[in-house]
Image (spheres, helix red, strand yellow):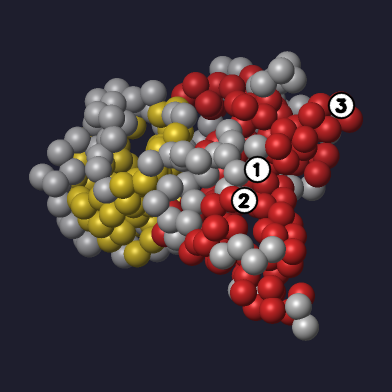
Amino acid sequence: MTGPRVDSRVFGAEDAVSSTNDFGMRVRLQASHGGVHLQQYDCLPGAGQREASASWCIVYQQTGAPRVRRVIGDSSELQLRPAGKISIHPPNAWGWRWDSDNRVAVLRISQAIFDEVASDAALQGCSGQLQTPLSVDDDLIRHTILELLSECSVGSKISSLLIDSASRHVIAHLLARYSHARQDKTSGLAQWKLKRALDYIDEHIDQDLSLEELSKGLDMTAHYFCRSFRKSMGMPPYRYLISRRIERAKELLASTNKDVSEIALEVGFASPSHFTTAFRRSVGFAPRTYRDSTRR
């Protein structure tokens, strides 16, 4: 059961803000997988810049209200970004300056994933038409980033399936909300494709699954599979995986004397604490309390 790493080190130079320490930026955590990077920074007043990038950069302002100057190509803009606001930076944004202490969470998604999602929506080449606001209200992006941060906070790794799905969900949202291009409509999975995916999840429930694994052999891109799965099941693949893990755990709690920690690992959770958090969120009380209730 291996998953994307979560640590406090800066990742590849092509996407990281250069010399973060020199600019008063401290990386609190990082998770990365398959062209997607999540970081949380504490920032002192300063500036940053990077080389030409192949990633979209989505910033969630967690605390503070800095005035942010952004440079894209030969032009720049200055705007207040209060806590709760979102910035959307295209790959050719290269410079930033901020004037006060603040904390941000940054989600970087590769251009390759953007192109995959756009292609599935029949919107190839539309990235130049996308609006890229420096400060905007966007509940979907905020909630998505907060969910990723929450997953990072309860364990040493984050699910590949979650970060895969979340990144494509964000890009699909950007195309729907910030592009004037027209998208197609997604249908659900054919029954045989859905059955194969559900069987695969059940057979590998203890593993760190990815969209690439689930879509393999179905003649679908990872993003199109994710959208079609959601259409068929009413939830994204990661949510379904968690629900199946909880159901398997409930069976083991009721029928065996295995320790809760052992069950947590057997059904695929990264740690007992992650299992307890997910179980309580789903069932309403802790695993041990559930076990006791089945034996009265």
Residue at the limit of the structure toward the bottom, as seen here: 296
Which mark is nearer the camera, 3 or 1? Answer: 1
- In whole angstroms, how far apart are the C-alphas of marks 1 and 2? 6 Å
Mark 1 vs mark 2: which is more N-terminal?
1
Disc 3/disc 1 C-alpha distance (Å): 20 Å
The amino acid type found where label 1 is placed reads Ile
**Residue at image point 48% right, 56% down:** 271
Q: How many neighbours does mark 3 have within 10 angstroms: few (below 14), some (14-19), or many (20 or more)?
A: few
At numbered mark 1, what does the secondary structure look like: helix, strand or loop?
Answer: loop
Left or right of residue 221, residue 28 in this image: left
Q: Secondary structure at mark 3?
A: helix
Residue 195 image point, x, y percent: 83, 33
> What mark, if any, has residue 192 been given in the picture?
3
Q: Amino acid at mark 3?
A: Trp
- Give the class, few, some or many, for how many residues have Cα within 10 Å of label 1's Cα (few <14, many ≥20): some
Q: Quadrant of residue 167?
A: top right
- Circles 1 and 2, Cβ within 8 Å, touching? The answer is yes
Mark 3 or mark 1, earlier in chain = 3
**What residue is pinned by disc 1?**
205
Please tell me which residue is depicted at 22% across the width and 46% down the height of the picture: 97
Residue 96 appears anywhere in the view = yes
Q: Position of residue 90 (x, y in %)?
A: 42, 31
Check the image and name the residue furthest to the right: 191
Give the percent coordinates (x, y) of residue 208: 55, 39
Residue indicated by mark 2: 267
Q: Which residue is more in the foreground, 204 or 101?
A: 204
